[in-house]
Image (cartoon, rainbow, N blue to C red):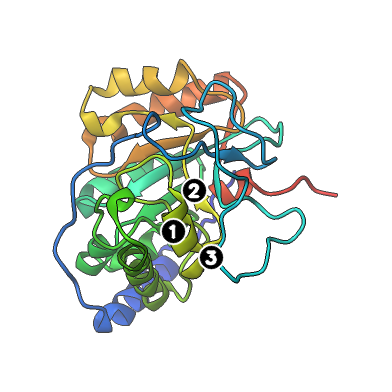
């Protein structure tokens, strides 16, 4: 996917504008640590864009294709289910998705790697991180990437009741809207690979009808070294995968050139999550 290359002047203007818009957003403290994939503990398996369970990636039967808040309208024909983890389009594409928090200088280095390769990625940002570094919202978008919601405080969302989960999602959504004019298309719950029914319902209530899970975990947040991160991705990657990666880890940045080269050798094109799950052109 080609990256939208704006001029340096336009990029600086956008980032300055985003920082100004953030003046009214109150920053709060850091949330919990890195996410833990809970494939074996998830209350239900994620679905592909076709609505079919993911062979070989499921830990338990999914209780239903979609989960929406009580009283809400059913999804439109052809709409995505309440959670997706892998696309079933058959196109030779994968989505590189990043859990968004970390030192801005490190994030800049990582984004520079993917932008040199003319690749767009999807960043799921933590609200408190945006509160501390509001200019990063504009920086992500200025690089031609996609920006979404990874909860306000990065806490264990599977342990939350409905109202607490809603507040976590809505608070980050409000930050994104204040900074960019949009809450973004995607929500990914923190500290879990898959959402449960409560989280999916509250995400829909907050304006996210589809949660974005992932099918391939790089395990980069465990600091295994860049070579292990490369193996964790390239040894298992397949068309349609949503790959979980993280900001804030030097090993991830070091691994990216080899990952991008390996995807190219496999004829797999990295795209944003929205492009991955887009229907085929008529």
Residue that protrudes farthest toward the right in the picture: 282
Q: Which of 114 and 128 is in front in this view?
A: 128
Q: Which residue does the image show at 19% across and 45% down from the upper left? A: 33
Res 26 label: none
Q: Which of 14 and 226 is in front in this view?
A: 226
Residue 132, above or below 101: below
Query: Image quadrant of residue 114?
Result: top left
Please, what secondary structure does the residue beneath circle 1 have?
Answer: strand
Q: Which residue does the image show at 60% across and 45% down from the upper left? A: 64
Mark 1 or 3: the one toward you: 3
Q: Mark 1 points at which residue?
A: 148
Answer whether residue 84 is visible to the viewer in this image.
yes
Query: Image quadrant of residue 63?
Result: top right
Residue 170, above or below 236: below
Where's residue 153, x and y in %?
A: 24, 60
Please, what secondary structure does the residue beneath circle 3 have?
Answer: loop
Q: Which of marks 1 and 3 is nearer the N terminus?
A: 3
Where's residue 257, x and y in %?
A: 39, 28
Q: Mark 3 points at which residue?
A: 69
Q: Which residue does the image show at 62% across and 23% down from the upper left? A: 267
Contact, CB < 8 Å: mark 2 with mark 1? yes
Residue 143, above or below 96: below
Where's residue 152, x and y in %?
A: 28, 63
Query: Image quadrant of residue 216?
Result: top left
Res 212 label: 2
Q: Which residue does the image show at 49% across and 64% down from the upper left? A: 184
Q: Earlier in the sequence, mark 2 or mark 1?
A: 1
Mark 2 or 1: the one toward you: 2
């Amino acid at each position: 996917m080609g990256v939208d290359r704006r001029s340096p002047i336009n990029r600086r203007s956008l980032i300055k504008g985003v920082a100004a818009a953030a003046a009214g957003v109150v920053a709060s403290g850091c949330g919990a640590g890195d996410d833990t994939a809970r494939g074996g503990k998830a209350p239900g398996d994620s679905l592909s864009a076709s609505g079919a369970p993911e062979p070989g990636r499921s830990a338990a039967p999914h209780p239903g294709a979609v989960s929406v808040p009580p009283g809400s309208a059913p999804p439109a024909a052809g709409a995505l289910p309440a959670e997706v983890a892998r696309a079933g389009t058959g196109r030779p594409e994968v989505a590189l998705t990043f859990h968004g928090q970390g030192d801005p200088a490190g994030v800049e280095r990582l984004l520079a790697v993917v932008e040199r390769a003319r690749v767009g990625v999807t960043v799921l940002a933590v609200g408190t991180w945006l509160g501390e570094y509001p200019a990063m919202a504009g920086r992500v978008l200025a690089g031609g990437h996609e920006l979404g919601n990874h909860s306000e405080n990065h806490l264990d969302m599977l342990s939350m009741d409905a109202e607490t989960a809603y507040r976590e999602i809505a608070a980050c959504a409000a930050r994104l809207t204040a900074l960019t004019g949009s809450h973004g298309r995607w929500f990914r719950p923190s500290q879990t690979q898959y959402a449960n029914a409560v989280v999916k319902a509250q995400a829909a209530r907050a304006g996210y009808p589809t949660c974005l899970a992932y099918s391939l975990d790089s395990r980069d947040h465990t600091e295994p070294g860049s070579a292990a991160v490369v193996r964790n991705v390239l040894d298992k990657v397949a068309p349609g995968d949503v790959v979980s990666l993280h900001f804030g880890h030097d090993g991830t940045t070091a691994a990216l050139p080899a990952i991008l080269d390996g995807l190219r050798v496999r004829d797999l094109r990295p795209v944003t999550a929205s492009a991955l799950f887009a229907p085929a052109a008529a």
